[in-house]
Amino acid sequence: MTTASFSTASFSTASASSGASVIPSGPTIRADISRPDAATLAAARALPAATLHEAGGRIGVLPSAIKPVAPQFRVCGPAVTVHSPGGDNLWLHRALYVAQPGDVLVVHVNGAYDYGYWGEIMSAAAKACHLGGLVIDGCVRDGGILADFGFPVFARGLCIRGTGKDFGARGWINHPVLLDNLTVHPGDLIVGDTDGVVAVPLARAAEVVALATAREAKEAAIIQRIQAGERTLELYNF
C-alpha cells in the first residue's frame, strides 16, 4: 500500500498511479492503533450491549438516540474514531481506508446532526473494505437501501440534507471523541444492538467480556427458576 499525505493547511486527493491502494495520512490521522484480541472479539459478538454495560459496572453508554437503522443490525468490533467537521463527510471517506477489516467507525459530527453523512455509496465502500459497522452521532440517508445492504449502521436518524467536502476543514481519525459525556478511544470495544451501543475501554475489554459471559449464564438460570414458579422478590431478596 502507498500513503496519501495531507498537510495541515490543505488536503487533496492523492492518486495511486502504480495501482496500489492509498492509505490517507497526515498530522491528525493515526493509522496504527491497538485492538482487542481475536478471542475477546469473538466472545463479544454473542453478548448483548446492555449485558456488557452492566457487567463492566454500568459503563460506556453512547447517546440513546443512536439506534440501528434496521432492527436486524448488530455491530461488534474495535473503534476507529472520527472527528468530522459538521455538515461534511470527507473525513468519513478517508476513515474508510484507514480502518482495517472488522473495525467500527465511531463518528462525532460536532453537534451538526441533521445531515445525511452516510448512504448507499459509503455502505458499499465499507462493505468492500470488510469493515464491521458505523456508529455515528448524527444522521444518515438511504435508509431503506441501507437495510438491504446488510452493512450495520447505527445513527441518530435519517436526514436527506447533503454534506460538503471541504478540503480545508480539519478533522481527526483515531483520536478520542466525546459523544455526550462519554469519551470513546481508538481501539475500544464497540457493541451495538436494538437496545443501543456500548463502548468498553480497550484495557478492560477481555475482563468485561468474561464478566458479561458469566452474567448471561446467571440470568439464563434465573429465567429458568422464574419459569418454574419462583418470584423475583425472593430471588433477589427485595
Image (cartoon, helix red, strand yellow):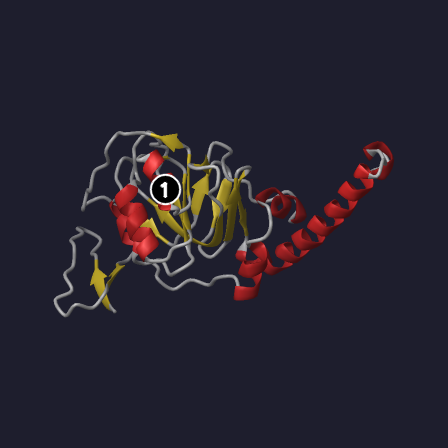
Q: Is there any visible trace of residue 75 in the rendered image?
A: yes
Q: 130 or 83, which lies in front? A: 130
Q: Does residue 19 lie above or below 208 as drawn?
A: below
Q: In the displayed structure, does residue 55 sit left or right of residue 230?
A: left
Residue depicted at x 19% and y 45%: 168
The quadrant of the picture occupied by the N terminus is bottom left
Pick the quarter of the image with the C terminus: top right
Q: Nearer the viewer, residue 226 or 183?
A: 226
Dot 1: within a 10 Å radius of its alpha carbon, few (fewer than 14), some, or many (20 or more) residues?
few
Q: Residue 114's image quarter?
A: top left
Please tell me whether mark 1 sits on a helix, a strand or a loop: helix
Q: How many marks?
A: 1
132 sits to left or right of 3: right
Q: Position of residue 218 (x, y in %)?
A: 75, 49
As displayed, is residue 16 above or below residue 131?
A: below
Q: Amino acid at mark 1?
A: Asp
- For the point 26% across and 45% down, the residue is 121
- Residue lying furthest left: 17
Q: Is residue 115 left or right of residue 153?
A: left
Residue at (38, 44) in percent of width and height: 107
Left or right: 141 with respect to 191? Answer: left
Where's residue 66, x and y in %?
46, 35
Q: Is residue 37 visible?
A: no
x then y, percent, for residue 219: 73, 45
Residue under pointer 1: 148
Please tell me in which quadrant of the rendered image residue 83 appears.
Answer: top left
User: For the point 30% across and 38% down, which residue is it?
Assistant: 117
Residues 192 and 186: in front is 192
Q: Residue 55's spot in the image, x, y percent?
A: 67, 48
